[in-house]
Amino acid sequence: MLKLRAFAMEWRRNFITYLQGFIPLSSEAKMALLDALKVRQYAKREHIVPLNGVSDVISFIAKGCVREYYHNNQAEEVVVWFGIENDIAVSLPSFISQRPSHTAIQAIELTNVVQLSRADLYQLYDQFHEIERLGRIIAEHYLMNSDAYIKELQTQNAAERYHNLMTLKPQILQRVPLSMIASFLGISGETLSRIRAKRANY
């Protein structure tokens, strides 16, 4: 816990730096954001958002790895996203509507996050137009990523999607069980092994 506190301010500042990659923020807005941010640690397999739970925080991953998944009609887990350092983890439809989320977000390893609650965010919207604009831009970014994921499912085969995953997040292979990667790709473990073997021979 002491180690967590020692890094808390650094992680909060890193989150502010991340946000300013979208738009610049005034000193007043940055200070208000810093005051609203909390740091939390999730154990391996602990849920940030449980299945059918309501997403009421935005989580910036300072250190760790998470997955987003849902249960299909056969009650099988289907992984739709992996998040690592400097990613934002949130079930945006649930966060906005405050209705139960159709997907869950779970820590794959010990994970430290910087969180901003929905209540604090909406209060900041009322105080700072620039933060309200920032929220809209991040929501658009989230929706564009979701659209890209859907198009990837519709137009790419498993080998192409595996290549994209390894290009964008190569460390995933060392941090995530192969069964989860296979689920993300929509293939069996055996097919994933063949893809990996073929890629290794290139």
Image: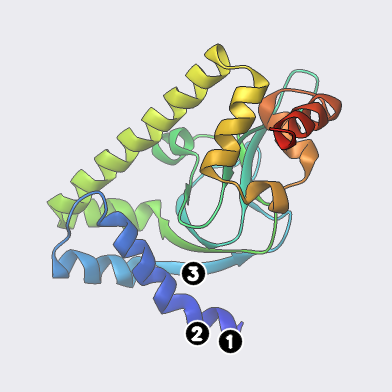
Give the residue drawn at x 32%, y 42%. Answer: 138
Cα–Cα span, label 2 and label 1: 6 Å
Q: Secondary structure at mark 2?
A: helix
Kind of residue at disc 3: Val
Q: Is residue 71 visible?
A: yes
Circle number at residue 2:
1
Number of numbered labels in the structure image: 3
Kind of residue at disc 1: Leu
On screen, residue 75 versus residue 116, left or right, reads right
On screen, residue 146 versus residue 163, left or right, reads left
On screen, residue 97 versus residue 28, left or right, reads right
Circle number at residue 39:
3
Q: Nearer the viewer, residue 24 or 189?
A: 189
Cα–Cα span, label 3 and label 1: 12 Å
Q: Position of residue 80 (x, y in %)?
A: 61, 32
Q: Nearer the viewer, residue 103 or 181?
A: 181
Circle number at residue 6:
2
